[in-house]
Amino acid sequence: MGGWNIWFGLINFAILAFFLYKFGKKIVINMIEGNRQKISRELEEAKAAEENARNITQTLEDMDAQNKSQCQEILEQAKERSKRGAERSAQESRALADSRLSEARHDMLSLKQQTMTELRDESTGALLEETTKLLEGDKYAGERSAMPQRFVAQLEQMLELTDSDKAKLRWGDELKAELFSAQTLDESLVEKVKALLENKTGGKFSLEVRVDPELIGGLRLKLEDTVYDGSLQYMIRRVGEELKAGESPSEDIAGYFKDKFAAASNEPGCFQTGIVESLADGICHIVGLSDVMSGEMISFEDGLQGMVMDIEKNRVSAVLLGDYENIHEGAQVRRTGKVMEVPVGEGLIGRVVDGMGHPVDGRGPLLTSETRPVESPAPGIIARKPVSVPLHTGIKAIDALVPIGRGQRELIIGDRKTGKTSIAVDTIINQKGKDVICIYVAIGQKESTVAGIVAKLRELGAMDYSIVISAKASDPAPMLYIAPYTGAAMGEYLMYKGRHVLIVYDDLSHHAVAYRELSLLLHRPPGREAYPGDVFYLHSRLLERAACLNDENGGGSMTALPIVETQAGDISAYIPTNVISITDGQIFLEESLFNSGVRPAINAGLSVSRVGGDAQPKAMKQFASRLRMDLAQYRELESFSQFGSDLDKATRDTLNRGRKLTELLKQKRFDPRTVAEEVVAIFAANEGFMDDLENQQVPEFERRLTAYAYENAPELCAAIDGGKKLNDEQIQQLRQLIENFKGDFRP
């Protein structure tokens, strides 16, 4: 029984061992396989992690290298921008320093010349006074007694009848002659003079002999209104005029006078004279001057100058150019033989002068000796060439809508206080560094206004290439009348020298009023609005002198910007319509736009440029052509949109685009823009990059965009500034540039 229990136990143990072996092996194998797979997975994950680590390391290394490259590139760009900025600053500093140095040298030279002139005038007066005393003494009695005989001998060669004398003889009248001497004449000399007169007049003359001690010595013959003066009084006066133009002598006065007398006084003076008949309101009526020319310059006893305006049968009417308080009836007037002329030349640049070209800025005499007639014929058609070079104003609205070319005449017209002068002054300021000489003619402006303009031009460095002619409101009408012709003469001189000139007439309304005043005082018959019939010719002969000369005539140009003031926006008045028909277009400034804050207040519908588009920069012409149409549509839709609120999407889009364009074209004073700045801003507006902006955000967007364009695409901006037309690749580059900026723009 015990053995069976043992065998039963062994059998159970064997069965248990079998099952343990059978199933345990499988479990162990599964456990081992699971561990192996786990280890494989972990190894694969470790390999993947290692690969990822290597990739991350490589990426980090690549990013580090790229960042280093970008930092280096940014650093190089910053260095380049800093270099360009430093160069620009250095150039501007050098230009400013050169300008200040040139101005200081000019002031020193002018002061020195003024001082020398004053000293010379004082010494000249003392010299003439002492010379007169010496010549009146007994020491020179022999020389004085020989002068009458010499005068009669010289008269044989000089005596000629004028055209008026010959005409009088043909009418059967006799000529009146007067012979003056310092002492009683010998009868033989009187007979010789009578013989000369009889030979010239055929015996139709009367001679009166008079003694005038003021002559000191010598003779003076007056035949009708022609004077042959061989007196010592005349010789001394002539020597005095020569002394004022040169240096005072250091040698003995008597010796100096003897030398001058021997060299210059052997021949008597010959000139035609007249007598002041009446004088009032700057108009002088003169008897005599029978052969005077229209427009001739005449001289009065105290040095005052006048200009002949009317020639009648028995008298001459002239306007007085200056203070005429010392002129009285009976005063003597002398012909100069020259038409009215004014000083011209490079020496006037940087100066302020009056309507006669005399300096009024307190900087001494003008450093020029050249003169030019105030009236001269305009260049003919053969001497001209088409307008082809733009005159960049720096004002977006003008350069885009009504461009101006060199040699053009563009009228600026509008009511009082609408910004007409501001446009002209901004245009002058924008010519800095562009080889354009600017002439600003102020006609009838307040003295304080002109002083403010001059101060601003000097502050911004514009006086270095400008001339200011000031005919103040307090000046007599003749000065207001002559001022624009003076400016035209100065500009013409530079134009014929091959220079480019911009001249502003501010304004021709006052000029026409001054001419009307003169005409009525001269008793010329009035016409429409009391203006004389030749008021159109008054302005046409002035503005026609603006031209663009061909290369055979020097290639210079003179661009005219006349200004005319309207009353209540009436451009159909007499003077505005006259000037509009003379000029090549007009910039019309509207008072309602000005009062609403649109400045410059240019009415795009009434403003036009007839030739400036041919000279417009190609890139500007490329993108600004649709600007006028968009603005016109906006103005029209804006007026109708006030009557209804239910607008379709196209109308809303047009109104929105028009508002953005209006904001874009607003511009502050003294803030000129380059061509590239204008083109980039207009292109952005045309392409709709500003449509989603608020109106008040447009100026900031434009300012930052143009700065961004110059920093990131300098070659593109240089091409636009150079007047080149953009190709498709450049247009795409410009579009991409604006898109990049728009993506980063935060108001």
Image (tube, rainbow, N blue to C red):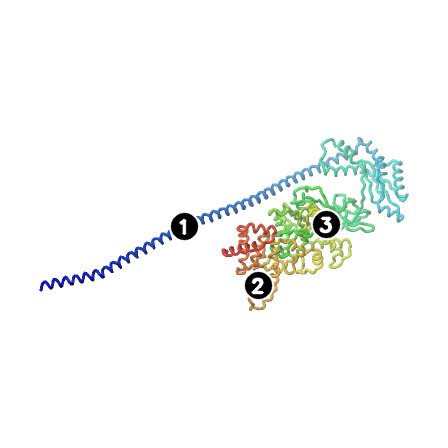
In the picture of the structure, the residue carrying the numbered disc 2 is: 655
**Of the residues tagged 1 and 2, which is closer to the observer?**
1
Helix, strand or loop under label 2: helix
Disc 1 residue type?
Gln
Count of labels shown? 3
Q: Pick whichever, 478 or 86, lies toward us.
A: 86
Q: CA distance from mark 3 to mark 2?
A: 48 Å
Position of residue 304 relative to residue 397, above or below, is above
Neighbours of disc 2 within 10 Å: few (<14), some (14-19), many (20+):
many
Query: In the picture, which quadrant includes the N terminus?
Result: bottom left
Q: Earlier in the sequence, mark 1 or mark 2?
A: 1
What label sits on residue 410 in the rendered view?
none
Are the two marked residues, 3 and 2, in contact with CB atoms closer than 8 angstroms?
A: no
In the picture of the structure, the residue carrying the numbered disc 3 is: 383
Residue pushed farthest left?
Answer: 1
- Displayed quadrant of residue 404: bottom right
Percent position (x, y) of residue 396?
A: 60, 55
Disc 3 residue type?
Ala
**Horizontal relation, residue 474 to residue 15: left or right:** right
Q: Earlier in the sequence, mark 3 or mark 2?
A: 3
Q: Is residue 505 in sight in this rendering?
A: no
Q: CA distance from mark 1 to mark 2?
A: 55 Å
Helix, strand or loop under label 3: loop
In the picture of the structure, the residue carrying the numbered disc 1 is: 58
Q: Pick whichever, 658 or 565, lies toward us.
A: 658
**Of the residues tagged 3 and 2, which is closer to the observer?**
3
- Displayed quadrant of residue 248: top right
Q: CA distance from mark 1 to mark 3?
A: 75 Å
Neighbours of disc 3 within 10 Å: few (<14), some (14-19), many (20+):
some
